[in-house]
Image (cartoon, grey):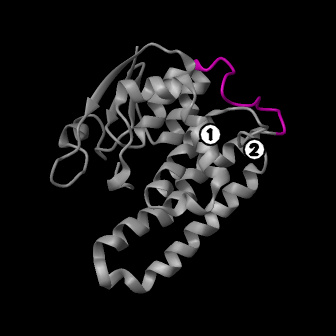
Amino acid sequence: MLKLHHLVSSRSQRILWLLEELGLDYELITYPRDPKTGFAPPELKAIHPLGKSPLLEDDGRVLAESGAIIDSVLRRHGQGRLAPALDSAEYDTYVHWLHYAEGSAMLPIVLGVYLGRLGEAGAPLKPRISSELQNHLGYISGALGERDYLVGNSFSAADIQMSFVLEAARSSGALESFPQLVAYLERLHARPAYQRAVQRGGPLNLGSQGKR
């Protein structure tokens, strides 16, 4: 059986949601954040050297990194669901969003979090970081267009992966200028599998966004 090591209010919410969408049997182990620092507890280091979440145990292997976990779960257990066919025109678009979420889009959000902790010392960089975040959100909004989902107008694991970017952006107030993305996020939240994931793993509270 799959075993998900889930840190509350973290990226691992995506993997929990993925498992619910696929209707897979899994064991859920939930970890609270340190009440003082907001970081993951040291117990996760006993499972993976980085001590981060999500971590998924599958057939004796420990998988880390959201995109890699999603890819592995769909290859091994997806039975063709939540991803376009390898030989389809949409597959490269799907892979782009799967990696873009953490490879590019989250960077200005995380930088904004840490700059905020610097107070006045970080003020000179805030306009540049804010501009870059708006650039990324504009790109996502333009790519979505009038469609319901990012890849071929069908719900896929790329939407699950990208959801955390929009959650984090919304928590900082950056999503207010993009009503189309707000509607997209609400559409994702309306999915029964997402709601089941929240019931099992708890709601996202990204006041400490960017932590894992």
Indicate yes or no whether the magenta region holds residue 174: no
**Residue at x 59%, y 36% (from the top left corner):** 188
Q: Horizontal and vertical percent for residue 153?
A: 77, 37
Residue 150, position in %: x, y? 71, 43
Q: CA distance from mark 1 to mark 2?
A: 14 Å
Q: Is residue 4 visible?
A: no
Q: Residue at x 33, y 44 (%)?
A: 52
Mark 1 vs mark 2: which is more N-terminal? 2
In the foreground, 142 or 43: 142
Answer few, some or many: residues within 10 Å of disc 1's Cα (few below 14, many 20 plus, some between 14 and 19). many
Residue stretch rendered in magenta on the structure: 77-89
What's under tag 1, amino acid-wise?
Asp
Q: Position of residue 96 (x, y in %)?
A: 68, 49
Residue type pointed to by label 2: Asp
- What SS does tag 2 mark? helix
Residue at label 2? 92
**Residue 102 visible at all:** yes
From this view, report whether residue 68 is shown above or below residue 191: below
**Above-or-below relation of 118 to 202:** below
Q: Residue furthest left?
A: 36
Residue 52 lies left or right of residue 149; in this view the side is left
- According to the picture, the residue beneath numbered tag 1 turns out to be 159
The quadrant where residue 112 appears: bottom left
Mark 2: give few (<14), some (14-19) or many (20+) Cα within 10 Å: some
Q: Residue at x 34, y 54 (%)?
A: 207
